[in-house]
Amino acid sequence: MLAGWEDIRAEVLRRIRAHDWRPGDTIPTEEALALEFGVARATVNRALRELAEEGVLERRRKAGTRVALHPVRRATLDIPLTRLEIEGRGQAYSYRLLSEEMASPPPAVAARLGLPQGAQMLHLVCLHLADDRPAVLEDRWLNPETLKVQPDFHLVSANEWLLANVPYTTGDISLSAANATADEARLLDLPPGSALFIIDRTTWDRDHPVTCVRLAHVPGFRMRTTV
Amino acid sequence: MLAGWEDIRAEVLRRIRAHDWRPGDTIPTEEALALEFGVARATVNRALRELAEEGVLERRRKAGTRVALHPVRRATLDIPLTRLEIEGRGQAYSYRLLSEEMASPPPAVAARLGLPQGAQMLHLVCLHLADDRPAVLEDRWLNPETLKVQPDFHLVSANEWLLANVPYTTGDISLSAANATADEARLLDLPPGSALFIIDRTTWDRDHPVTCVRLAHVPGFRMRTTV
DNA sequence: TAGTGGTCTAGACCACGTA
DNA sequence: ACGTGGTCTAGACCACTAA
């Protein structure tokens, strides 16, 4: 036997895939399964909890545990610092601050951060290079109220400074593709219209907006994961 | 007090962000923390395990628990069926099989699946539409050995059929951006060179290769997540 | 080989939400 | 009201691995 929680998880998954339990069905209670498999309820709980986190099961108190109707695969993406990502590929990392100024953000940015239209924010544009070739163009709007001290963004990238100094609790990430504008193409040394991989990220410290950043990655960039 | 595992998790996170415990530091053992917080070791274990899964801590038997050196954010992406995704936006879903033939896959596909160069595979090209406008172009290679029966892919999309009939255990996913080729642009009714969001997916059933698919999404497509 | 995390148990109480 | 999952406890044994 040797039924650990991973064995229980595998057996439940097997029954779902074999259609013993079909999408929408309520499966037996933790207590019943614990009895069947001859393990403690906590062991069954661990197995079913993992499957629920993966999106395979849906659990509600009193209502019981059901096989999820919509088979959603859930993948976990690692989102590293640009510097670490480049260094991880064995390339030399460098970084250039292209511009730094107080300005009024575009309406879309102000709206996403929940700030009034006219608010002044710190606007940074910088370039991340791999082996001295442009890799990522970063366009960032910073809420100046979250900056107690004003670091020198020539020396340290905004991302790394924020990570170390402004712990945030929540954030949105959006992944998309876009054709490079003329400016982007020039700065990234690409033909105009090249397909860029865009990561848009907005972060809050509790209820206080912190930053809104767009990272435009040159063609060849990939995010990988396993399910 | 009322220290549940979420409270422990929050307090550990607070200490890390306050630099009480710095990246690379070894933090106290589960036993010590359980004593300090006045809870059972299992409660501390749950809290630290969650933080390890999020990439904040690194745990090894005997060596102890350390604050992760490289602050990697880990985001979970939901990867729904194309049909459900379109219907979820309130649009009408439809689907067209454009071609279906046995052929020899390009070397890159054969290599990724670990099949010999000359192997014959089933090649499907199909189009997913939202409100009768092209949304996703699917280019799929199927290992015929995994198909016990040959379904009619005019009626059911390969993805949904596979999901219901070929349970797979492992899979790779890769996200990238690419300019539309002339063919892709024509099929998707886009200007040539449009930036497409590409999801490449390879799946195995244990050690048996099942399928390798490229989903090209029209501009405007986004994947979102929260961290 | 010894210290640390990983897991299991048997029991208990509680929170939630359906009926 | 009551059934179900969510969590906690105190103790135990095991697995891994650094010293």
Image (cartoon, coloured by chain):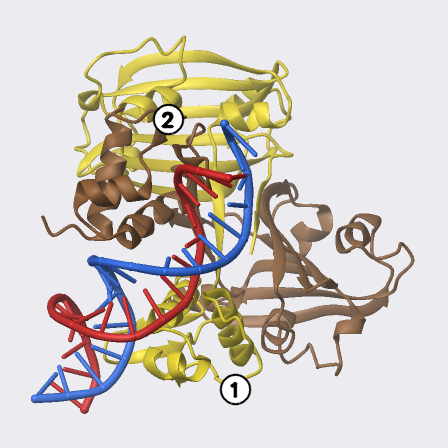
Chain colours: A yellow, B brown, C red, D blue
Task: Give the percent coordinates (x, y) of residue C15.
Answer: 14, 66
Q: Kindly indicate whether the residue at mark 1 contacts the one at mark 2 (C-beta within 8 angstroms).
A: no
Graded by Cα atoms within 10 Å as few (under 14), some (14 to 19) or many (20 or more), the crowding at tag 2 reads some
**Residue that sits furthest to the right in the current view:** B118
Q: Chain of mark 1?
A: A
Residue A88 x, y percent position in the rendering: 59, 27
In the rendered image of this protein, does residue B79 appear above or below residue A157? below
Label 2 residue SS: loop
Mark identifier at residue A20: 1
Residue A108 lies in quadrant: top left
Using the image, determine if residue C4 lies above or below residue A92: below
| Quadrant that contains the C terminus of chain B | top left
* Badge nearest the viewer, 2 or 1: 2
Give the residue drawn at x 69%, y 77%. B153
The amino acid sitting under disc 2 is Asp
Residue B50 position within the rendered picture, expressed as x and y whole percent measured from the top left = 36, 49
Q: Are marks 2 and 1 on the same chain?
A: no
Q: Is residue B162 left or right of residue B129?
A: right
The image quadrant of residue B157 is bottom right
Which residue is found at the position 50% from the left and 71% from the top? A3
Image coords of residue B209 (percent x, y): 74, 62
For the residues labelled 2 and 1, the Cα–Cα distance comes to: 48 Å
In the rendered image, which residue does mark 2 sit on?
B25
Indicate whether A127 appears above or below B32.
above
Residue at the image position 50 percent from the left and 14 percent from the top: A95
Q: In percent of the image, x 47 and y 68: which residue is there?
A: B84
Q: Is residue A167 visible?
A: no
Rendered position, A73 above or below A94: below
Residue B174 visible in the shown view = yes
Type of amino acid at the residue the image marks with label 1: Asp
